[in-house]
Image (spheres, rainbow, N blue to C red):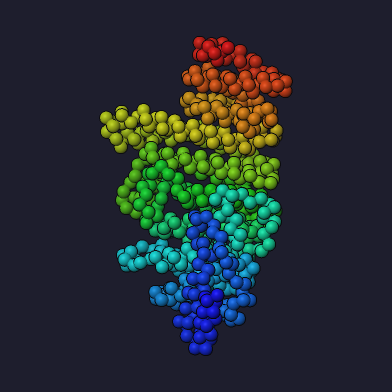
Amino acid sequence: MASKERLYEVWMLYCSKRDPDYFKKWLEIFIGSYEQCLDVDFEKPLSRPEEVPPVLTLLPDNILQVLRHQLLQCVQKASDGLEPEQQNLALLLLKFLIIICRNLSNVEEIGTCSYINHIITMTTLYIQQLKSRTKEKEMMDQSQAEDFVRHALAFCESLYDPYRNWRHRTSGEQLGSVERSRQKYKAAPLTVEFVPFFYQCFQESEHLKESLKCCLLHLFGAIVAGDQRNALLAISPATMEVLMRVLADGYMGNTSSDETEDWDSEAVSPMALLTLGCLREVVQCLLASSSDQRQVEIVSVLENYFKLLNSDPAVVISARQQQQQQAKGRVPSLGRHWECRFVALQVHMLDTIRDMFLCSDRPVLQAIFLNSNCFEHLIRLLQNSKLVNARCTTADKDQKDITNNRLQTEGDAQVFQGRLDSLAVATIKALTTVMHKSPAAKEVFKERIGYNHLYEVLISLNQPSRHLLKELMNMAVEGEHTSVGLLGISNVEPLLLLVQWLPELDSPELQLFTADWLRRLSCLNRQTRATCVNAAMVMRALVALERHERLHRACAE
């Protein structure tokens, strides 16, 4: 109550004396009362403010007019460079707008005012300043500029994703259609300035902090998740070009000058993971729209996606070498850490394909994937995976002396085999997802690829893990193989493949594990027995038994 009285008192002083210092003081008191509502860090869990900010009608009558005037003055001076005091005022104005928008009934009115365009103009200037790298700029404290950019992007989020749908999804919480239907207030209409602003931020941005780029990606995701109408305006050829370029940079590591992370590290960059989340939202949004509403078709998104998924590592590393040579004169070589990240990102891309199918119209999306030759791309991914290892092994030999190389060869081979196996598992999961409950998709796979070819590709990757064998069983039941009693056998072909693979398994333990589960799956009931008999599983078993010397005794029995 004391703060409200103080606010009234300071506002009266401002109105009588027209002293900007009183207005600034009023903003500071107001922001201090509702600081919990700011929530500008996209990475942190959402907080629940104890007190909701007031509706605009409870604020001073001419507050929006004063706000617009002060903001316009800041914009006009920004091109020449704001003094620290003016920068502080601009940030206070921005914080006030964020807080006001946390009362969702205010979003529509704030969104229709000119504030957002003024904010984007200033943010563009600040980002250009942060992207440039001169000796003078390196000596300057850029923290105020960075702080303004973070708050500006959070303000945009409060306008275009008022219910924080994107933050809920990135934290692992899925909002269903019922929850979405209960969202009473709509997002503000997206400004036409957004797409050029987003595109320009990522041009020649090697000196822009990765953390700020992540905020930009969070904002794009928020716009797509916040409102279907805005999403279709934001999903354009320009923004898709940015997302694919960021994802491609994920193969080559961090290029921002501020971070010290070695580009040859094994970790997938946060930017790449955020981009995958954005692409998942993009595909699901486009799927729910009509062709006359879309600027970009899902087929074109998938075409670029699969092209990147099957990138030739030699081409990628060559581009990186040229980039480093031009920038610093230091030419990195292709090593096993880089290769590890390369495979890890491919696994994440495969997992994202599965996430795309968490939608209401799976059959349509399945048809689009089939038209995009997804089966051919996924099989080619496995075929190309050994090429990565061969090139990296050669590079490792160049980097290490002979003694160290001998000591590490066996361990490196085991590590790579584990990564290769995780890639194979993710590929099988993606194949299962595309074929799930679709006889037509299964038939297309048999005609275009065939399970014999899949088998040949898998055995070329050396010995499988238990995880990979389980995943083939999951493919057969289109769910957890342990639930076969409820699910039944939907696709018997992977089981035939496993019977054929038994003699090739070097591990007696894996032979016994696979044979035991094959027996359980095929003999569970009359229906599963009939399915396996009709698929000639008995003949496959007899062929495997002809190589009894390769089978463990218990497995053969």
Left/right placement of residue 443 relative to residue 255 reads: right
Res. 336 image quadrant: top left
Could you say which quadrant of the image residue 533 lies in? Answer: top right
The image shows a total of numbered marks equal to: 0
- Residue 144 is left or right of residue 182, and the answer is left
**Seen from this angle, which residue lies furthest bottom?**
16
Q: In which quadrant will I find the C terminus?
A: top right
Task: Pick the residue in front: 145 or 369.
Answer: 145
Closer to us: 111 or 46: 46
135 displayed left or right of 526: left
Q: Residue at coordinates 48% horizontally, 20% vertically from top-left?
A: 507
> In the displayed structure, would residue 12 be above or below residue 287?
below
| Residue at x-position 41% and y-position 42% | 266
The residue sitting at the front extreme is: 1
Tell me, yes or no, if residue 284 can be seen here: yes
Q: Quadrant of residue 223?
A: bottom right
Residue 379, image x and y in percent?
Answer: 55, 33
Q: Nearer the viewer, residue 155 or 541?
A: 155
Q: Is residue 66 visible?
A: no
Q: Residue at x 68, y 43 (%)?
A: 362
Image position, residue 199 (x, y; %)? 51, 60
Give x and y (percent) for residue 69.
Answer: 53, 80
376 is higher (above) or lower (below) than 135: above
